[in-house]
Image: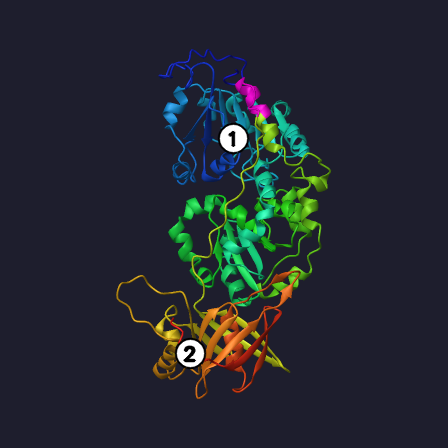
Amino acid sequence: MDTSGDGRRATGDGRRATGDGRRATGDGRGGSVLFAARSAIALYRLLDLLPVFAGDARVSRVFTLVPGSDFGVDALAAVERVGARSVPWDEACRDTYDLIVTASPKGELHLLRGPRVLLPHGAGFGKTFHGEGSADAPSGLDPEYLMPHGAPPPALHALAHPGQIDRLATLSPRAAARAAVVGDPTLERILASLPLRESFRAGLGTGARRLIVLTSTWGGESLLRRRPDLPFELAARLPQDAYQLGLIVHPNEWSRTGEFELSERLAPALDAGMVLARPYEDWASVLVAADALITDHGSTALYYAAALDGPVLAAYDGGDELIPGSPMAELLTHAPHLGRAEEVEEALGRYRVGTGRAAAASAFLFPAAGAADQGSALERLRLELYRLIGLSPPIAPVTARLLPIPAPPSRTPSAFAVRVRLDGDETHIERFPGHVDAPAHHLAAEYGVAGERQSQSAALLYRRTGRATAAAYSVEWTVDGWISHVLDSYPGCRTAGVVLSPVHCVARVRGGSLVSVRIEPPRENGRIVHSDPAAVLSAVHARPAGVSRVTCVIGGRRYEAHLSPATAEEAGRIL
C-alpha cells in the first residue's frame, strides 16, 4: 500500500503506532481508514460514503478534525452524535493509515501518513474565493491546495462528472492524472430516497400544500447575508393553507452563527411555521420533499435539479464568487429571478421544465445525461478504495442509506390574520400568520396556545382535542361547556369552535345555537386531501347564521361544509 502517494510502501508490522510511523491499527490482515474532516460540511460528505465499508470487520474506521478552519466547531460534535471514534490531530499525524479519506483539500493534510482520497464536499465546483489560493481557481480544484509545497496530489481524486476532470486538467495535468469519475454519493442517497417523498412531506406536515424551500450558502454573497428578511417576507406573503416554507442553511453558516443565534435571527419566519432543516441529512430530506426552490449561488440547487427538476428561482444578485460557465452559473442564468417577495408566484409560473436538469447534467452523472449506470457511485468508490487498501471488496452489494424523516417545524402559528372573499356561494379563505401586519377580515386564534393578547383580539377562538395532560387531578370541559365559557369570557369573540377531527367540528356563533360542522374534503387522483379544519371554521364565521352549507375554497381547493344542529352527544363530548 502506498502510504503517501510518493511510491513508498507501508511496512505493516501489525503493532499500534507510537509516533514512529508504524501502522495505526490491525493485525496485519485488515485495513485502517482515517476520515479527516476540516469542517462539518466535509464530515457530512464523508459520512455519506460509509456504506462502502459496511459489514467489513477487517476495516477499522476512525475520525480526526483537521485544524485551521473557522467552521470546524461542529465537526467533532457530529462525530460524537453518530457514535464514531475520533483521535486528536497530533495522534493522527503520528500514525500511519492504510487509507485517508477527506472531502476538502485544505489544511496540512501532507502531515498525515497514508494514501489520500479526496472527495468533493459540494456539487459543480462553481465558486471561487478571492484572497485565498490561486486566482479564480474553483474551490476544490485549486492546485495550490491539491499539491501544497510541491507535495504529490491525492492518490485518488474522486469526481462526479467527466467535465470536472477536463477542468482539473487545465489547472494541473499532474493532479488530473490521479482523478477518476465515480459519481456523487450524496446525490445517490437523494435519488435512492425519492420513494420516501410522501413520508418526508407527512413528517413535515406539508399535506397538499406547495413546499417552497430557500437555500442559502455561506459568506458575504449568500442569500441570508444579502436578503436576511426574505424568509419572513415570503411567510407574510404566501397563504398558510396553500404554501409551506423551508430553509436550508449551509453548515458553515450554522457553525459561524450558532444554532441559537441563527434561530433568533429567523424567529419571525420560524414563528410563521417555516421549517429550518438541520445541517446533516435533514437538508436532503427537505430537498426531496420540496415543490420549488429559491436559491443563491450555493450548489444545493444542483442536487434538487438533478433529483426532481422542479421549479428553481434565482435569488442571487451577482458578485465575485460565482464562476462564469459553471453548472451553477448556468442554472442561475436560465432560472427566473426573484426580485420582491410578492413576485414569487409570478416567477414560479415563468420557470420552464428542464432548465435545472440541463444545468445539472454538467455536474452529475444521471439518466438524463445518458448515464445508464446511475446508482453505482458507491460501488465504484468501493472498488477504488479497496484497491488502495489492498483488500478484496466484500461480497455483499453496497447500497446508499435512505434519508431519515425530517423534523417538523419547531413552531407553528397559533393565530391567523384571515382574509375572506365571498364569491357567490363560495367563501374563499386565506390565512396568514397573526403577527403579520396585513389587512384581514378577522383574527382567528387557537385557545390555550396563542397568547392572551391575541385571544382577546380574536373574533374566532378555537381549540383542538387531544391536548389533555396526564395529571392525576384534572378538570375536563365538555364541548358545549367550553364554547359557552369562551363566549362569556371573551366579549370580542363572535364565534367559538372545537376541532374534533380533520372532518368534524362543533361551533357556535354568538347569539346562535350549537352547530355540527361536517367537512367533505376533495378527492384528487385517489387521495383525500385534508386542510386545517380551523380554516373551515373561519368560513363558517364569515357566513350569515342559519346556513346549512358552506362551500369553502382553501388553498385553491373546494371543501364542502355541511352544518346541522349539534346532537346531545356532540355537545357533551369531553375535550
- Residue neighbourhood size for the residue with mark 1, other residues' Cα within 10 Å, grouped as few (<14), some (14–19), many (≥20): many
Residue 426 visible somewhere in the drawing: yes
Image height of 159 relative to 394, above or below: below
Residue 153 visible somewhere in the drawing: no
- Within the magenta stretch, is there residue 27? no
- Residue neighbourhood size for the residue with mark 2, other residues' Cα within 10 Å, grouped as few (<14), some (14–19), many (≥20): many
Amino acid identity at mark 1? Pro
Foreground pick, 120 / 517 = 517
- Residue 541 appears left or right of 349: left
Where is residue 121 shown, x and y percent of the image? 54, 37
Where is residue 430 shown, x and y percent of the image? 55, 72
Marks 2, 1: nearer the viewer = 2
- Residue 75 appears left or right of 327: left
Mark 2 lies on a secondary structure that is helix
Residue that numbered label 1 is attached to:
105
The residue range painted magenta reads: 383-395
Image quadrant where residue 553 sits: bottom right
- What distance separates the C-alpha of mark 2 from that of mark 1? 68 Å
Foreground pick, 434 / 367 = 367
Contact between marks 2 and 1 (CB within 8 A): the answer is no
